[in-house]
Structure formats: C-alpha cells, structure tokens
Amino acid sequence: MPRASELTEELHRRGPRPAGSDAERRAAAWAARQVDADPRRQVRTDTLWLRPGWRGAQFAHIVLAVLASLLSTTHALVGLILLATALLAMLADWRWCRSPGRLLTRERATQNVVSVSTRTPRVRLILTANLDTTEHDPRLDTTLPGWLFWVVLATAWLLLTALARLEGSHTLAVAVLQLIPTVALILAAAGLALGGRPADNAGGVAAALTLLRLLDAAPPAHLGVDLVLSGAGVGDGQGLRRLLRAERRARTAPTTVVLGFSAGPTAPTAPPGPHDPTQFLASEGPLLPLGCFSPLRRLAGDTGLLRPGISRGVGPALPARLRRLPALDLRGDPDALVQAGLELVDRIDAYVGEIAARGRQTG
C-alpha cells in the first residue's frame, strides 16, 4: 500500500485542478480508482452542477457596495437600498452559495467521490478532503475574524453613513467616516481580483485515502467509515454541502461525525515537513470564528499527536459544522495526519462505545 506522501506526490504531478475543470474530473477518476482497488470497497462518483466562483461573486458584491457608497453622496435612499442589497448578498453567498453575484459566474460540473461503508454502525464517520486547487487561498491563521467579516463590517458601516445622509447629515465627519470603509472595500476587491497564494490539498486527499485503507483492514467496533472526496471545496465547500443537504432532505444518514484532512498552511511548492506540527482546528471560518465540536477537540488533544490551531478559511469539514454536525478539521504532513487520524478514530470509537454502554445501563 502506498504511503500518504507517495500518493500526495502522485496527485501533485497532475498539476492544478481548478473547481469544475477537466483536471479536477481526472483527479476524481484517479481517486475513485484508488478506492476501487480495494475489493472490500465500492465507490461512486456523483456529478454536481454548481457555480464554484465564490471569488467572482464576492468581488461583484464588493463592487456594488463601493458604487452604492459613491451614489449615496447624492442619492442617499438609492445608495442605502443598494448597500443593504450588497450586504445581504454577501451573507447569502457565504451561507447558501446563492446570491446575485453568484448568478454572474459560470455554472460548471464537478464531482464528489463517495464510498459508503457496508456495515450498519452506531455512528457514521466521514473522512473528507477537497480535490480541487486554487490560485487564491483565503485561509488566514489569526485569532481575529476572517476576511469576510471585515468586508461585511465595512459594508454595514457604509450602510450607517448612508442612513445618516438620508436623515440630512452632510458634515465633514460623515464624509470621513464614509471614506474609510470605502477604501477598505476597494483594497478587498483588489485582493480578490489579483489573487494570492496557491493552495493544493493533495496531502489531505492522500491522508484520507490511506487512513480509509487502514481502517478497512482493522474496522472500528462502533463506527462505519465513509469517504467523501469533494469537488469545489476551496472557499465554500460546495461539494460536501450538496451531499449533506441531499442526505438531510432524504433523512437517510445515521448519526454522523466528520473528520476533514488538509495539507499544512504552506503552499504545495513547499509542503509541510516532519518538523511542522500536526494540528486540529479549534475554530475556523472566514466570517465569524466557528468553534469545532468540543468533545472532538478534547479527544484530539488527548491523542498527544495533535496540537490546537486556528484558521480563518474553509476547511474540508467546515460545511458539516454549518449543518451542526460533530466535525473536526486536521492539517499537517500527510503521513503524520494518518498516524494522528488512526489514534483519534480509536478514541472516537471508544467514546461512542462508552455512550452506548451508559445507554444500555440506564435503559
């Protein structure tokens, strides 16, 4: 069986895999073959039509807010309405991936590679990672809120200045207060347009594939292990969002725990080495920091192999937290992730067994 680092290099050699591209589809086919090589596993590839252009959508909303700010100096009511529209669109695009700006982006086909356990477990454990790459990684490692929070705050600030103008206030103080967030939004739009550091989660995909094979060789007593390698995961996690939404509507999924795997914070040209810490993310999210499930954080800390970290981006498991499911993102060197993942799954399995035993005693 190849080590996770070997699978990482193999996927890296396939080059960039933007969401909805032919390269991403070829990567999904490659991942499906890795799973299908195990006779104990069945795999399917779900094709999804969606609009993965989160950057273009939020860029459009920011431009609308800037134009509305300029318009509010002479037409306060019109500027106020447009600013409120931009603010609601920013929030809707983040929460549901649906907004006026999203409609301006191209619809593309992406794939989820899904393998479901044939067992009937007490708890379903999903191992997940995103297959796509991006030229603009929105992650920030900071205790402050993420980039989207500041964009939303600046737009709300402009909304208040437009309201002040509507009530007849045209003082120099109002003009200065309007100028500050307007400049901030222009800089944010420039950042989205120009791009940033690249991101390639080949290490997370390799770790999930390797861990799945090891857990199939020695299955947990109380967990059924599934795999979801999602398409269009960078920026908003659309692939996993679609899967969880469909299962919620069908009401077919048992109690679900999600573990997400991602490469370390460095770019793929300089992958994390053995000296870099393997982390679990105690909180993440580009809008408001969303705390991860506390029992999972405690179990991860008890392994002794994982240190707490933070991220203001979208980890592979964050869509599950938005669905209020127990979820935790892990990141680091691929082989170290596999070792830490094995230890964490053992502790989750024991934890589920303890809860089941207490339930039988009280019953």
Image (cartoon, grey):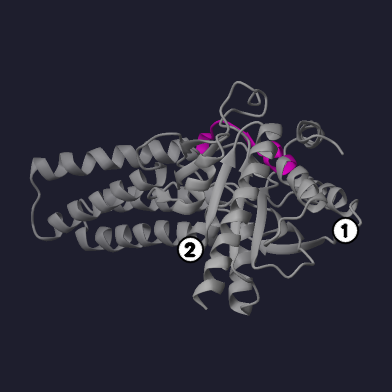
Q: Quadrant of residue 178?
A: top left
Q: Secondary structure at mark 1?
A: loop
Residue depicted at 57% across the width and 66% down the height? 357
Q: Give the quadrant of the N terminus.
A: top right
**Residue 197 forms part of the magenta stretch:** yes
Give the magenta range. Answer: 193-206
Total marks in image:
2
Residue 308 drawn at (x, y percent): 47, 37
At label 1, counting other C-alpha atoms closer than 10 Å, the crowd grade (few under 14, some 14-19, many 20 or more) is few
Dot 2 and dot 1 residues touching (CB under 8 Å): no
Q: Nearer the viewer, mark 2 or mark 1?
A: 1
Which circle marks residue 324 in the picture?
Answer: 2
Residue 75 drawn at (x, y percent): 22, 58
Which circle marks residue 40 in the picture?
Answer: 1
**Residue 52 visible in the displayed image:** no
Residue 191 drawn at (x, y percent): 46, 36
At label 2, counting other C-alpha atoms closer than 10 Å, the crowd grade (few under 14, some 14-19, many 20 or more) is few
**Residue 270 forms part of the magenta stretch:** no
Residue 213 drawn at (x, y percent): 80, 48
Give the answer, above or below, for where 49 lies relative to 12. Answer: below
Disc 1 marks a residue whose amino acid type is Arg
Residue depicted at 76% across the width and 46% down the height? 209
